[in-house]
Image (spheres, helix red, strand yellow):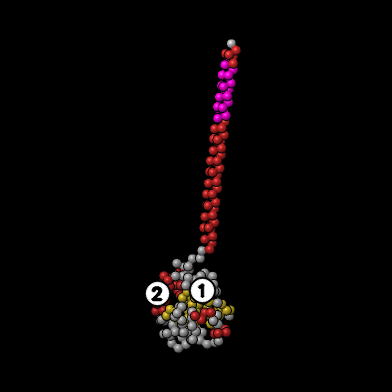
Amino acid sequence: MQQKLWGSLLLLGTLGILTGCGRSADQAENHSSQTSSKSANLASLKAENSSLKQQSSSSSVAKAESSSATPASLWNQAKAAQLADFMDSWGTIMNQQYQSYGPGNDTNYYGIAFPSGFDKIALNIDNQKYSAAWSDDGNGTADYDVVAIYCNSETAHAMGEILYLFAYVQQEPVVLVTQQTNGDVTNEGVHFRATENQDLTAGFKKIAEK
């Protein structure tokens, strides 16, 4: 009888131990599952944060590149060719012949060389001096960014020479003209004024604003 009692107790103890082990194993698995889930969530959050940082960085770079980009060209070779055609037609109407001048091909307007003389001779407009400089695209830093020069000095009668400067001032197209034949151009500058010929002004403006 005693042996049966001890056997029963031993069996119950064994079952308790097994049950306890089973619960411990379940708890360990649940803890492992929770830990894995937390790790997965943390990895997902890190990936999202990394993606957001990359997007923010890309956006910042794009904005920086946009802000540092050079201004759009106001003048180009196509417009220069259109102006050349226009000046041929306009000169014919005016019974005048004009030649185009630019870098490496200076004017000889009563001894004045443009465009190489722009850094030596100021433009005197309404008794105020302004700087002028040649500009290939119209986006220069001078008061007048000159994109084209036309003069009839090769074909004009004596004392009948006319010099035109086609320029941008604050990105607005303007045509300046001079017929100055004397004076101290070194100290006083060359006297220019906005042309009064509306056809010439309108023609240049139409080409410049295309």
Decide: is 42 above or below 103: above
> Is 40 colored magenta in this rendering?
no
What count of labels does the image hold?
A: 2
Q: Give 45 or 138, whichever is nearer the viewer.
A: 45
**Residue furthest bottom as drawn:** 158
Check if mark 1's residue and mark 2's residue have beta carbons within 8 Å: no
**Type of amino acid under label 1:** Asp
How far apart are the alpha carbons under marks 1 and 2? 21 Å
Under circle 1, the secondary element is strand
For the C terminus, the image quarter is bottom left
> Is 12 colored magenta in this rendering?
yes
x and y percentages locating residue 45 in the rendered image: 55, 44
Q: Give 86 or 1, whichever is nearer the viewer.
A: 1
Say which residue appears at 42% left-offset and 80% top-offset. Answer: 99
x and y percentages locating residue 118 in the rendered image: 52, 79
Say which residue appears at 54% left-offset and 32% top-offset. Answer: 29
Q: Which span is picked out in magenta?
A: 7-26
**Residue furthest front as drawn:** 3
**Residue furthest top as drawn:** 1
Principal secondary structure, stretch drawn in magenta: helix
In the rendered structure, find residue 145 and report the number of the disc placed on it: 1
Q: Residues within 10 Å of mark 2 (few under 14, many from 20)?
A: few
Residue 175 in view, yes or no: no
x and y percentages locating residue 24 in the rendered image: 57, 29
**Type of amino acid under label 2:** Asp
Decide: is 77 above or below 32: below
Q: Which residue is mark 2?
A: 85
Q: Give 140 or 110, whichever is nearer the viewer.
A: 140
Q: Nearer the viewer, mark 1 or mark 2?
A: 1
Q: Earlier in the sequence, mark 1 or mark 2?
A: 2
